[in-house]
Amino acid sequence: MTSLLLIILLLFSFQVKAQVNNLLLTDSLFNQGNINTTLVKLDSLLQNDPDNTDAALKLGDFYYKVNMLNDAKYFYKESLNRNSASVRGLLGLARIDFLKGNFNSAQVLLKKVISLNSNLFSPYSILGKIYFLKNNIELAQYYFNQSLIVDPTSVEGLTNLGLIYQELGKNKLAEKYFKQAVTFNPKDQIAQINLGNFYSSIGKYHLAIITLNKALILNQSNPRVFLSLGITYLDSRLYDEAKKYFNKILELDELNLDARFYLLMINFEQKSFDSAIRHADILSSLKNNYQQLHLILSNIYFLLSNIDKALEEAETEVNYYPDEIEAYYMLGNLYKYNGNEKRYNEIMGTILNRFGTVMPNLSVGANHFGNASISTTKIGKK
């Protein structure tokens, strides 16, 4: 080997090593919370070496992590301009499309990723979620099973299948997968929370409380555990105990929307309407279109004999959530109660046309409006 060739090879080796070290440095900076320094450093690397695909991908990854999705998308596309078969670039774009609800575009990208590298967990998992959201349970189940072939002990994969079987009403199978997630990952708090939430959703409150307390031991400052425990005690109608956990969340984050909602819910259930309205005012100032906020307020104002305000709140809920049937039930019953048969019949027609069902002849009850009552498990499956 000539001396000149050796020098060239050594220089190339040093350059590659320097690039790797610089990229590792940006990882370290980002993990330390130095986001601005990280982005400036990566931009410098890309400016000095415009063909540096890894730097473009890192910029996409970091912007994705801080939820600046448009910038992330730009740099993922930049990486694909340098390498059209970049699995990371394609997967990055697919994740963004998924988050933005562009499911068809995400599907195309994810299937291309699988064709390039079938040994990745994420594309199968995301495809499963897409088909689950499209109510194609069969394909969702297929892709979740494929993800478990790649990683049989994944908390996410096992939880996904647990949710599928829970959706199908096969609770024994659902429990099997939720419990497997805990068995394979005993120190994973999310696995314990998922199992606890499952038990709570099927009314096994003792098992839910025991499991969620195991999760609490793993991390005593995670608001998700407090939220799950609070909901479980709320569903059990142990309101004072539920309040403790929702207030713990507010100690960590006074702007937490879910904690505010459930404290509103407890005050509503206990008929402490003034306190409920105060919580509602705070929640409304943070997010006025929080789901079911105006539905509860409509219930409250009806019980306070303020029918005009109850109607206003029900109308607001319908406007925010035109695809949710409960607000229409509430609104229809209010008009019927108020003697406005014409408006009542119009709403019944809307319910029939939009939801394909006939509104039963519900009467206004002492606490809730029949099917318009609030579900305390609003957050849903975790």
Image: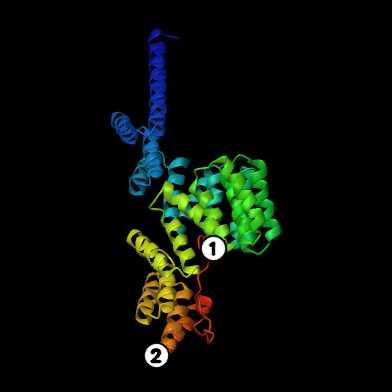
Residue underneath mark 2 = 340
Query: Taking 57 as reference, is 140 above or below it?
Result: below
Locate residue 78, reporting x and y percent.
35, 41
Locate residue 346, reporting x and y percent.
41, 87
Determine crowd level at label 2: few under 14, some 14-19, many 20+ residues with C-alpha closer than 10 A: few
Locate residue 236, reporting x and y percent.
60, 62
Frontmost residue, 237 versus 65: 237
Q: Amino acid at mark 2?
A: Asn
Say which mark, if any, is on residue 54. none
| Residue 238 visible within the image | yes
Rendered residue at 37%/64% (across/down): 278
Mark 1–mark 2 CB contact (< 8 Å): no
Q: Secondary structure at mark 2?
A: loop
Apparent side of residue 220 relative to residue 310 in the rendered image (left or right): right
Frontmost residue, 281 versus 241: 241
Rendered residue at 47%/68% (across/down): 268
| Residue 118 visible within the image | no
Query: Taking 283 as reference, is 73 above or below it?
Result: above
Number of numbered discs visible in the structure rendering = 2
Say which mark, if any, is on residue 377. 1
Rendered residue at 45%/72% (across/down): 323
Locate residue 300, reporting x and y percent.
43, 73
